[in-house]
Amino acid sequence: MPPKARFTKEEIIGAGLDILRERDISAVTAREIGKALGSSARPIFTVFENMGEVLDGIEKKAREIYSAYVRQGLREEVAFRGVGQAYIRFAIEEPKLFRLLFMRKMSADIGVSKILPEIDENYPVILDSITKLYPGSEEDAVMLYRHLWIYSHGIATLCVSSMCRFAPEEIGEMLTEVFKSLIIVRLKGRST
């Protein structure tokens, strides 16, 4: 008969997430999780097969937290701008989670045209927020999303690395200005 689990998966993942938030993903070890739970590392392995499973659970929880930010952004009057602001707010409020999800090395063969669907499971609903706002083609929506993500990611990275600070109103204005500029360029390209 296997030993009774002393901690739930949620408790172990929660402790790992706390360690990640305080320090870094490299600090998330079985020993550190055990210490945070007031135990040895051993009880972790009555619930999980290995640390890979624990880390996967932590990443999944980080994605859930990020998705809550996306849902909040989608409720804004201009949903797509709200998502961009939420992405940046997530970076500011959860810098370690942002680094885990959006600032790690990816496979060399993933180009910019494939990165968003790969790293963000919210891609379809975010893309839909553009097609509802902007009466262009799906190709136009993908182009707008890609360019604005690159811009938003740049702002978020500046914030996470403590290079710059921006007021929320300033972020909204910058995203709106870039969005309008991209639409004008796209429309101008059709008229020539």
Image: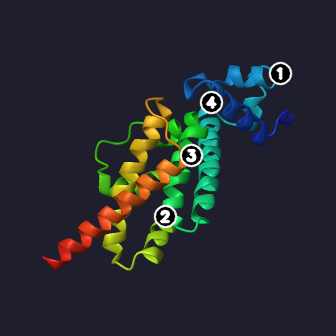
Depth check, front residue: 26 or 127: 127
At mark 2, the secondary structure is helix
Q: Nearer the viewer, mark 3 or mark 4?
A: 3
Q: Which residue is mark 4?
A: 20
Near mark 1 (Cα within 10 A), the count class, few <14, some 14-19 or many ≥20, is: few
Marks 3 and 4, how far apart at CA: 18 Å
Mark 1 or mark 2: whose residue is earlier in sequence: 1
Q: Identify the mark at residue 80; answer none if there is no mark.
A: 2
At mark 3, the secondary structure is helix
At horizontal 42% and vertical 60% (from top left) the residue drawn is: 176
Mark 2 or mark 3: whose residue is earlier in sequence: 2
The amino acid marked with disc number 3 is Arg
- Residue 67 in the image, given as x and y percentages of width and height: 60, 55
Q: Quadrant of residue 7?
A: top right
Q: Which residue is mark 1?
A: 38
At mark 4, the secondary structure is helix
Q: Identify the mark at residue 148; answer none if there is no mark.
A: none
Q: Is residue 18 above or below residue 189?
A: above
Near mark 2 (Cα within 10 A), the count class, few <14, some 14-19 or many ≥20, is: many
Q: Which residue is mark 3?
A: 89
